[in-house]
Image (cartoon, helix red, strand yellow):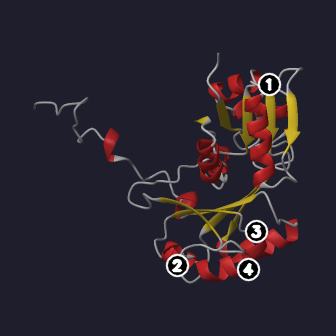
Amino acid sequence: MRQACVQIVGAGPGAPDLLTVRAQRAIEAAELLIWTDSLVAPQIAALAPAGCEKLRSGNLTLEQVLEAMLDGVRRGLRVVRLHDGDPCLYGALQEQIARLADADVAVEVIPGISAYQATAATLNAELTIPGLVQTIVLSRASGRTGTPERESLQKLAALQASLCLYLSARHVDEVQAVLLEHYPAETPVAVGYRVSWPDQRLQLVPLSAMAEHSHAEGLERTTLYVVSPALAASGAARSRLYSPDHDHLFRPKLEA
């Protein structure tokens, strides 16, 4: 008899071929698929087998989703909860795991590629350039749900790191105003809408035009902003790791 388990699976940024192998196998073996239909590409949900029960969760509350998962577990089904991107980022993961644990149901979390990674890859960009920026910050505008004061956008922007902002398009005017207090106006911003989907829109704009571009494109949701000096880096920067005068465990210093 199978142990009761729910798989919470990251569907990645949108393109089916950006699923991990483990995620694809979980979907293809699902007997009950509960998927965020407003954010996950239908081609990914279509990977589930013909006899799989499918429940769209875009209009459901957390309690309804959990009851559906528990009902599937009680019926002995392989339950897959499909999230967009990576479930560990803004996926209401913790509350689902906690409530499933209360019901003595084990959980397996399968990670997914996040939109910031897909965005950087599409731009052929590295977000950590030696001597320029070595930190990536993933965050969001405060909005209705708020953020802790210690993580205010003011404090994060002061780092001048590669800043990836999710769930922030509705607040882009306030976001731009705060960022301009810390980053130069010409700092590149990648504005990505549904990156890796067939209708992807991805544009590099200066920070000073971030809000104007967002309004012109009508962006309100499924939008990511990557603000980073790395997006304008020249090819002159070089990592010490591969420098001929830098020795390490796997490449000892050559004797003269």
SS under mark 4: helix
Q: Quadrant of the C terminus?
A: top left
Query: Residue 54: percent from the left, percent from the top?
Result: 87, 34
Q: Which residue is mark 3?
A: 169
Query: x, y (%) of residue 46?
Result: 86, 29
Q: CA distance from mark 4 to mark 2?
A: 20 Å
Q: Nearer the viewer, residue 250 or 110?
A: 110
Residues at discs 4 and 2 in contact (Cβ within 8 Å): no
C-alpha gap between disc 1 and disc 2: 43 Å
Q: Earlier in the sequence, mark 1 or mark 2?
A: 1
Residues under labels 1 and 4: Cα distance?
44 Å
Q: Is residue 17 above or below residue 125?
A: above
First of labels 1, 4 by sequence position = 1
Q: Nearer the viewer, mark 1 or mark 2?
A: 1
Q: Pointer 1: what residue?
A: 31
Tell me the distance, in whole angstroms, between the alpha carbons under discs 1 and 3: 36 Å
Whether residue 124 is visible here, answered yes or no, is no
Number of the label disc, if any, that sits on residue 153: none
Which residue sits furthest left? 256
User: Which mark's residue is nearer the viewer, 4 or 2?
Assistant: 2
Residue type pointed to by label 3: Ala
Answer whether labels 3 and 4 touch (C-beta < 8 Å): no
Q: Where does label 4 land, which residue?
A: 173
Q: Pick whichever, 163 or 69, lies toward us.
A: 69
